[in-house]
Amino acid sequence: EMLRSLVGSEMCIRDSIVTGGGIRAGESIVAGENIVAGGNIASAGDLRAGGDVSAEWGIEVATALDCRGNLRAKWDICAGQDLAVTGHLRAGQDIQVQGALKCGQGIKAGGEVQAGKDIDAASGIQAGATIRCGGHLATGWGLIAGEDICAEGSIRAGEGVCAEGRIEAGTGHGVYAGLNAVSYTHLRAHRDS
């Protein structure tokens, strides 16, 4: 267990990385088990963990983030490419992913959830602000947003879809909900003529 911040080029640890401070790597961060930081986690390359990843502040990864457990940060979680989590994904603020976002459980963010490609969560997705993706948006349970829910592709939920703002699927795609879709402003699914 380390009590101070870790700073290095590339970190490859067979077991867990635990520090009371932050973790910063010029290349990738790879751990066979958990990564726990009392501050920020920042990597100029990939971040891969065989277990949970937890940051007292934020997590910023320049390329891909792959977590085989739960992923949690009190602030933002940002990935320059794809983000894959086997367990739950929790952020106190925003979740921003340039590529695809895939979660084996639920996603919860105090702010926005954004992905440049598809968002796929086995359980529900809840955001304090907007949920937006450049591809398809799919969840096994419900979608709840404090603002808008927008996707360039289709929006699919095993149960309900609820937004304080608008719910909008891309041209030629629809909104599919097992129970109902409720928008406090309007619901619009674009259809080709």
Image (tube, rainbow, N blue to C red):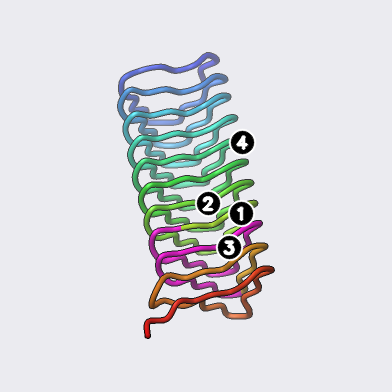
Q: Is residue 54 left or right of residue 173?
A: right
Q: Which residue is mark 2?
A: 113
| Mark 2: amino acid | Val
Amino acid carrying mark 4 in the image: Lys
| Rendered image: mark on residue 127 | 1
Neighbour class for label 1 at 10 Å: few (<14), some, many (≥20)?
A: many
The amino acid type found where label 1 is placed reads Ala
Query: Residue at image x 44%, y 58%?
Result: 133
Q: Separation of disc 2 and disc 1 at Cα?
A: 6 Å
Q: Residue at x 65, y 73 (%)?
A: 182
Helix, strand or loop under label 3: loop
- Say whether residue 129 is left or right of residue 78: right
- Determine the residue positioned at 55% across, 43% down: 94
Region rendered in magenta:
133-159
Q: Which mark is residue 74?
A: 4
Tag 3–tag 2 contact (CB < 8 Å): no
Q: Residues within 10 Å of mark 4 (few under 14, many from 20)?
A: many
Mark 4: secondary structure:
loop
Give the number of the mark in front: 3 or 1: 1
Q: Could you say which disc has been placed on residue 145 in the image?
A: none
Q: Position of residue 14 (x, y in %)?
A: 36, 30
Q: CA distance from mark 3 to mark 1?
A: 10 Å
Badge 2, how many Cα within 10 Å: few under 14, some, many 20+?
Answer: many
Assign a secondary structure to mark 1: strand
Residue marked by disc 3 = 124
Relative vertical location of residue 23 with respect to residue 193 in this rendering, above or below? above
For marks 3 and 2, give the one nearer the viewer: 2
The Cα–Cα distance between marks 4 and 2, rounded to whole angstroms, is 14 Å
